[in-house]
Amino acid sequence: MTTLLISDLHLHPGAPEVTDGFVTYLEHTASQADALYILGDFFEAWVGDDILDLPEAEPSGNAALVKRVVEALRTLSHAGTAIYLMHGNRDFLMGKRFADTCGATLLDDPTRLDNGDEPLLLMHGDSLCTRDDAYMAFRAKARDPQWQAQILAMSIPERLALAKQIREQSGDANSNKAEDIMDVTPDEVIKEMTAHGVTTLIHGHTHRPAVHQVTLDDQPAARIVLGDWQPDQGWDIRLVSGQAPELRDFPLDAPPSA
Ligand code: MN
């Protein structure tokens, strides 16, 4: 059983190299795996599943991007790889309709994954950054069904404009935040891992790919952080039952075997 995990592709009409790399990764790498987990911030922005109803030629380029991604995921799913999607802080409006269209299953954050004898915990990672009070307040609002309904009642161009505005505000705010506020809170990591009874946590979000050794009840444990995809570089984690998870980076035009 081979499982692959990726996150933080931030797919966007302005970065076609990453979309190309993702399609290549599905064809060459994920097609050899039993399951693919996409742990959030798959899209730079997701303004609602009704993006699927737009004509492919609409000017923002989002509909064409989504169509290409849907086709690539459907092909993968039809060929027998199970696909799982978790929300990130950018694409929290990704819904069941989009998942169904891709042949994918939406996951809760966190999700416990059984990998042989060793259960793992999967998260996007934003909920671990508890020292960022302003972001935690936005996160609570963004997960509120009433707020989501208000947003979804707006037109798609209005939603695209709002998403751009939120990204710009967050970029300005983040440039003034201390480095450690933007990273996970160590106590929160211990709390989640203990609550879910795991010794391995996998997440993305921070764009700080690394394998961190953690001590949990005097036992060795690990927190593995996925990297964000760049126009020339991708990241994944390869999980094979009975083996330690492997964090890999690779050139987007030559992804590794599963
Ligand atoms: Mn994120």
Image: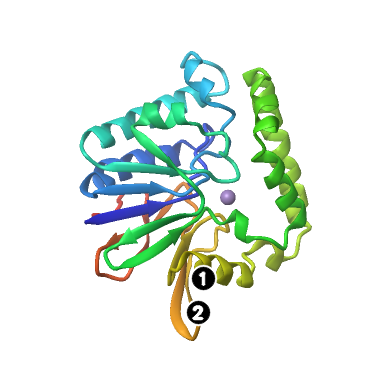
Q: Nearer the viewer, residue 128 or 51?
A: 128
Among all residues in the image, which is located at the extreme bottom? 218
Viewer-nearest of labels 1 and 2?
Answer: 1
For the point 67% across and 37% down, the residue is: 144
Other residues around mark 1 within 10 Å, as few (<14) / some (14–19) / many (≥20): few
SS at circle 1 = helix
Residue flagged by tag 2: what amino acid is it? Leu
Figure check: 56 above or below 205: above
For the point 52% across and 22% down, the residue is: 51
Residue 119 x %, y %: 36, 64
Tell me the CA gap for discs 1 and 2.
8 Å
Figure check: 42 above or below 61: below
For mark 1, what is the residue? Answer: 194
For the point 46% across and 46% down, the residue is: 231
SS at circle 2 = strand
For mark 2, what is the residue? Answer: 216
Disc tally is 2
For the point 65% across and 31% down, the residue is: 148
Of the numbered discs 1 and 2, the one sitting upstream in the chain is 1
Residue 256 visible in the current orientation: no
99 left or right of 126 in image? left
The quadrant of the picture occupied by the N terminus is bottom left
Residue 224 x %, y %: 45, 66
Other residues around mark 2 within 10 Å, as few (<14) / some (14–19) / many (≥20): some
Residue 225 x %, y %: 48, 63
